[in-house]
Amino acid sequence: MCGLLGVVSIKGSCLTNEDIKVLVGVGKKAQRRGVDASGLVLMEADNNIQIVKANHGFGTMIRTSQGRNLLRRARDGRACGLFGHSRLETHGYSGASNNNQPVIIGNWGVVHNGVITNAPTLRSEIAIDDLGIETDTVAIALLLQEWDQNGRKGSVDQVFERLQGEYSIVAASASGEILCRTNVGNLYSAEAETGSVLLASEPRQFPNQLEKTCKQISLNKTVTLRGHSERSGSISVIDVSREEAGMEGAQGLHLKEDQLDLGFSKSMTSIAEVAQEKAQDLKRCTRCVLPETFPEISFDGNGICSVCNDFKLPKYSGIDKFASDLEQNLSASGKVLVCLSGGRDSSYILHLTHSLGFKPIAYTYDWGMVTTAARENMSRMCGDLGVEHIVVSPDIRRNRTRIKRALTAWLKNPKLETIPILMAGDKPYYRWGREVARERGNIPVILADHPMETTGFKAMLAGANPSLDHAQGSSYRLSLTNMARMVFSYGSHAIQSPGLIPSLAKEGLIGFIDYYVREHKNFLRPFSYIPWEEEVIEKTLRSEYEWSSGEDRSVTAWRMGDGTAPFYNLMYLLGLGMTEHDTLRSNQIRFGLIERPEAIERAGQDNSFNVLGLASYFTTVGIDLKWAGDHIQRFAKNYA
């Protein structure tokens, strides 16, 4: 999920100034995949390895005096390899130097993109002492060092075959080797004019002329760019990390149950239980489970709500029609871009696309609130299927600072109608999907949204009245009048809570345009061709990919990829006596997928209070739990 970069001389000569110049360009473009940390490895002809790494982006790291010195040393005629890493933090806090790449164990230095899902098992089998390294990449370095210590018995391929999950790797040893390997295809090579080999996670990182001629490194085959030597060099590491405000919250989405603050847990559980009891007393539709608090709802003489009375069951054209339409949209490459959030629906669509015989590329937009469970699910699936996984990530540290600012302002003066401003940062997901598809040759894009997840009430609370397409759910289009109402609602709240103004002016405006203004019609939606069937989806994912649906209670199966969901669903429960799960189960009833008694039971389970997820959300963005809990209690009293 991070970005890799490299250049290696394979003809006995050393790297040239032009090689270094191109490598810097490749590295800067790697930053779109993450800028939480960076590292650069220099292999010299005498097998000495010089390393500079930092807890900030590649572009700033190479501008430090140590970074400049490393690049200067690379140009002095002794360098035979230079490779590095631009990090998206998944496992291991980037504020701790040991967790940033390259990870060094013994004679090996490793940079890695992806998630090793069996890293804990491998660590327990190999490591004796506590290494003080949390990142999963350490498992790769441990395996290589163990191989060395055991006299290199067996091939290096057998070493890498012990890994599970998603990985693309560049590794170097003090014995002179430089190796690379991928099991998903996120590693490309191109031959520079100097004869050196350039490496990158994506073709777009290469200069234009090389982007067209680059080749994807074959899956599950170790490529030796530089061989073993009897001469042993040394490894030296310089860390240029810096103190940065806001870094303390970076590991929040990894919060474990034994780390919960008991006072926060007790107080939040108490107010949630009161809200759940009140919700049971609400008048609800006799056909679905929507309550009387649903915006603009009305009931007929039989107690059936207006949403049910307006519903029309769509006709599905079937999976063959979907495959046919997708076939007609294929470009010369035959590739298909599948939008992958890590939730169950997008994961299933990746499986479905692959099983139909198409050649999918997975795409993820990670805005800082993607959960650890979702990242592991995505890596497990992509690794099992051998599917290339493209990640676009903003500056997550900065993004979380923006979320903290908006969330703090919202909690000081909370209003149900403006909760979506707190999720505006994920809306570029659509725009970047189109951009990545364009970069890969205008390939078709598949989106896993479906009518069951239509909520409607979120926009309606802000004064908008979205139109409905029962085959695909709530329309992304709003009339000018509805957009004006929504803008007025959000603007009014910002006047009362000035801390919201920066968020509305930037990520709010961008998100509004991306979601409501830009066209979405170019996305293919499989669930407009076939029914959404929860049991089939979950059974397939669990049986074939050991897919996790959040057994750690930090997420639910539906919102697997969204770390904000526990917060906003609690707010809706407190304010309306319902959550988006009530709309999901009601939609299932209308589509004839479940009966009302089952929907009531499932909605009750879905709406079980998720205190671990709530605490994780606040910890992630650096908000004090007691302060947040006090403000939530005040909010709850307004609806008591």
Image: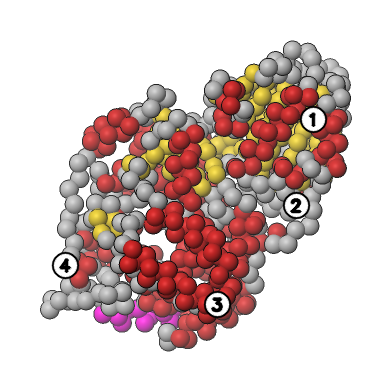
Residue 639 versus residue 371 in the image, above or below:
below
Residue type, mark 3 in image = Ser
- The residue carrying mark 3 is 497
Kindly identify the residue that appears in the image at 33 percent across and 45 percent down: 521
Instruction: Measure the C-alpha gap from mark 4 to mark 1.
Output: 68 Å
Answer above or below: position of 456 versus 44.
below
Q: Quadrant of the C terminus?
A: bottom left
Amino acid type at circle 1 is: Leu
Whole-number angstrom distance, CA of label 3 to CA of label 4:
39 Å
Left or right of residue 310: residue 559: right
Of circles 3 and 4, which is in front? 3
State the mark number for residue 309: 4
Query: Which residue bears the numbered disc 1?
Result: 42
Residue 490 lies in the magenta stretch: no
Q: Which is the main secondary structure of the residues drawn in magenta?
A: helix
Q: Earlier in the sequence, mark 4 or mark 2?
A: 2
Residue 96 is tagged as: 2
Give the label on residue 354, or none.
none
Q: Is residue 555 left or right of residue 236?
A: left
Element under disc 4: helix
- Count residues near mark 1 (Cα–Cα under 10 Å), then give few for <14, some for 14-19, many for 20+: many
4 or 1: tag closer to the N-terminus: 1
Q: Residue at x 49, y 45 (%)?
A: 432
Q: CA distance from mark 2 to mark 3?
A: 36 Å
Q: Residue type at mark 2: give it.
A: Ala
Identify which amino acid the numbered label 4 is placed on. Asn
The quadrant in which residue 630 appears is bottom right
